[in-house]
Image (tube, rainbow, N blue to C red):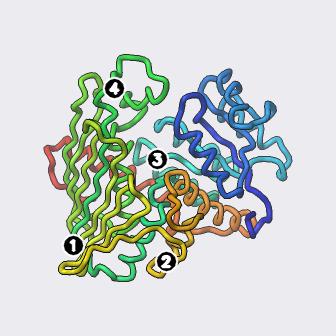
Amino acid sequence: MNPEINRKLRMGLIGGGGAAFIGKVHAISATLDNRSRLCAGALSSDPQRSREYAPLFGIREDRAYGNFQELLAGELKLDEKDRIDFVSIATPNHTHAEIAQAALKAGFHVVCDKPMTNKVESARELVKTVEETGKIFALTHNYTGYPMVRQAREIIGAGEIGDILAIRSSYIQGWLTTFDSTVPAARGVWKSDPTKAGSGSLGDIGTHAYNLLRFVTGLTVNKIAATTESFHPTRAIDDYGLIQMRMDNGALGLITYSQMSHGRLNDFTLEIDGTKGSLQWRQEDPNQLVLRRQGASTEIMHRHPAGDYMHELAKASTRIPGGHPEGFYEAFANIYRATFDDMAKNIATGFNPGINTLYPNVYDGLEGVRFIERVQASSDSDNRWLDF
């Protein structure tokens, strides 16, 4: 239970029905720690399907809505003790801003898929609305929820690998190699439409690579240069990119992203070189963190809540004993857990977390949209270096 309000938070899910992947992830992750319950939903842009999907999520008929406008209006008609506390937005990119704006102005907290919006202007408007309403806004860059990612952050913060010299963030997939955008697909058709997706693989996975390196190192980007390509024969939107960065401390940064690399599943890695050591984390083996020092044996740290080498934040981000793997859902749930902490405080006292939160917030969302815009601008100008 939430200590500040002594009850479960009530959730409304927008999008994510049918064959969609991420809606089910939200529903499972938000309720994993028994701190919230899914009460209402508008699960599809088709009103009939939206209501048909509701029973699959355990949503009662009277709380199954045809669209997000109906959901917000219907919930506001309920007594405050019954209506939802927050909405989770699991819809295509181009709809995020409108839905989030409406939900915030209706008085609900928001958890939103990334990227936050398709345009920098609409992202800035969302920042303004969050500040004006005082509501909690979280963005689901879920990889920041992995315990060993948080361990890496604490190691760097404690100075254990010295000053950071360089960062390499690589996110490689292969599913587009066999994808035919001319054939109707069960889900994700909008991702091939530039007007709806805003960007291709850059927004889908490149933003994760950028957000993770920022979360772990705490460094900001001063300058950026990028090349993006579309290698897919029937999909006119980026699917491969190389991004160079100069960080605020002078460190070098490099992001490689691809969804056109044969045989790669979800190969997301982060490597950080420091003056005293280096770190490596890999998403497909998320319960390990590798620490290397020249002339010393390689140290492989395993996620273990009782390990003496574990920092407190990493320990607090685990649920089960060492040797019992935790993965994608648990990391996603850690984003919800931190968000729920602030929601509960906000409901009880009007607490405002400000710009620094453990979960990705609206300011991180704005930075992610600016990252997309700068990468596209640099690529369009023949890889020219641009101020970030």
Mark 4 / mark 3, whichever is N-terminal: 3
Q: Which of the 4 image quarters holds residue 288? A: bottom left
Q: Nearer the viewer, mark 1 or mark 2?
A: 2
Q: Nearer the viewer, mark 1 or mark 3?
A: 1
Label ID, residue 165? 1
| Disc 2: CA contacts within 10 A as few (<14), some (14-19) or many (>=20) | few
User: Element type at marker 3?
Assistant: loop
Residue named by callout 3: 114
Q: Which residue is mark 4?
A: 179
Q: At 55% across and 58% down in the image, what residue appears? A: 335
Comparing labels 2 and 4, the label whose residue is closer to the camera? 2
Q: What percent of the width, then of the height, locates residue 238?
A: 28, 36
Q: Residue at x 64, y 57 (%)?
A: 133
Q: CA distance from mark 1 to mark 2?
A: 28 Å
In front: label 4 or label 3: 4
Q: Is residue 168 left or right of residue 342?
A: left
Real-space CA distance between mark 4 and mark 1, rounded to the nearest whole angstrom: 38 Å
Residue drawn 69% across the image and 43% down it: 12
Question: Is tag 3's residue or tag 2's residue first in the polypeptide sequence?
Answer: 3
Tell me which numbered mark, 2 or 4, is placed earlier along the sequence: 4
Question: 137 or 90, which is in the foreground?
Answer: 90
* Residue type of the residue flagged with mark 4: Phe
Q: Circle 4 — which element?
A: loop
Q: In the image, what residue type sits under mark 1? A: Leu
Q: Residue at x 50, y 50 (%)?
A: 125
